[in-house]
Image (tube, rainbow, N blue to C red):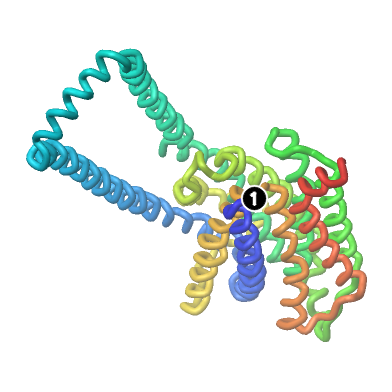
Amino acid sequence: MGWRYNAGLFLIATVVIIWVTSAEVTQDIFADYKQPFAVTYLGASLLVVYLPIAFIKDWFCNLLKCRSSKSGKNAECVDEFSVRISSPLKSNGVQKNFELELGSVIRKDSDLDLLTLAEIKPLVAKYNDNANVLKVERQLTWKEIATYGFYIAPIWFITEYLSNAALARTSVASTTVLSSTSGLFTLFIGAFMGQDSLNVAKVVAVLVSMAGVVMTTLGKTWAADESQLSDANGKHSLVGDLFGILSAMTYGLFTVLLKKFCGEEGERVDVQKLFGYIGLFTLVALWWLVWPLMALGIEPKFTIPHSAKVDEVVLANGFIGSVLSDYFWALCVVWTTPLVATLGMSLTIPLAMVADMVIHGRHYSAIYILGSAQVFAGFVIANLSDWLTKKLGL
């Protein structure tokens, strides 16, 4: 495991914390401003801020390269000039004797060697140039990145909207549990598209994680104000569960496509540019979806937040819960694997459980706690799948 993989695991833990915190904040927002589309549209559109950041970064890196190359050329010229003018002045007689001896060596013994060396040098230089060209070709152009961004932007928007719509109708813990079923979809979609291979260890990891998800679903939770929560959310619980499962499916598809476009370790695509174009496409082309959603009764009538406090919370949650965490999550997928990143996101279940216990005073049964432990065990097995396959010969 290289440093990118280890950094990806660290980012998974960071994203899990941010996502659970953002989910709690989002649910509090829906108490005063129940507009899942507006929250989703704002969060996804804010990704456009990565475009100027990426281009400024490229400009700065190119500027540093130009300066370093100019200084390198100047240093070479100075060294060559000093060799030419200093050697004859220091030892003129020795230089002449050396030239005479060298001439005799060239004439007698080294004609073949020098000719061979003269032929090899251009080939080596040409090989190095071709290697550099191949490295450059592996990087997609900004037009190709923009095209990929426009392809997957609707998938990402649908995933985010379904997740927020589920949060508006169910609890954070229930939405987190349903979203964690994406590990199953990621595994089979990745195998179908050739981005991941199936082995016994990976299947066991998914089954263990899914069993944990089922146990958390069957486990009992209760709180002092349980009757109020059930009255408020019972009407839409089935719709919320459906949105959560659909979000898990589109999440699995997006994860595999992201890995496919970015390459093994993200060498083909600048992730900042890709997400910047996703934000740009969302901002320009997806605003009109609010009207058919309202006509179908899925989305309530669009309103603007009535207080400055709600505006500030929605905007801050958009930057932290979407712009920052989504970019970190993309790096997790690119630097590890889609399956590891997806099962890693399942760690939101035990963290959401702790958050609900601390914030809302909820209590959980032993089955729920054991299921959360199994979700974590599935994540560990997925990380050790290659080692287990080699060790056990699976």
84 relative to 119 in the view: left or right? left
> How many numbered marks appear?
1
Amino acid on which disc 1 is placed: Thr
**As rendered, which of 59 and 36 lies closer to the eye?**
59
300 relative to 72 in the view: left or right? right
The answer to whether residue 256 of the structure is visible from this angle is yes
Residue 133, quarter of the rendered image: top left
Tell me the residue at 9%/38% (across/down).
Answer: 85
107 relative to 139 in the view: left or right? left
- Residue 93, compared with residue 184, is above or below; it is above
Tell me the residue at 57%/39% (across/down).
Answer: 263
99 relative to 192 in the view: left or right? left
Q: Disc 1 marks which residue?
A: 336
- Residue 84, compared with residue 3, is above or below; it is above
**As rendered, which of 7 and 119 lies closer to the eye?**
119
SS at circle 1 = loop
- Residue 300, compared with residue 357, is above or below; it is above
**As rendered, which of 34 and 166 lies closer to the eye?**
166
Task: Name the quarter where the C terminus is drawn.
Answer: top right
The answer to whether residue 292 of the structure is visible from this angle is no
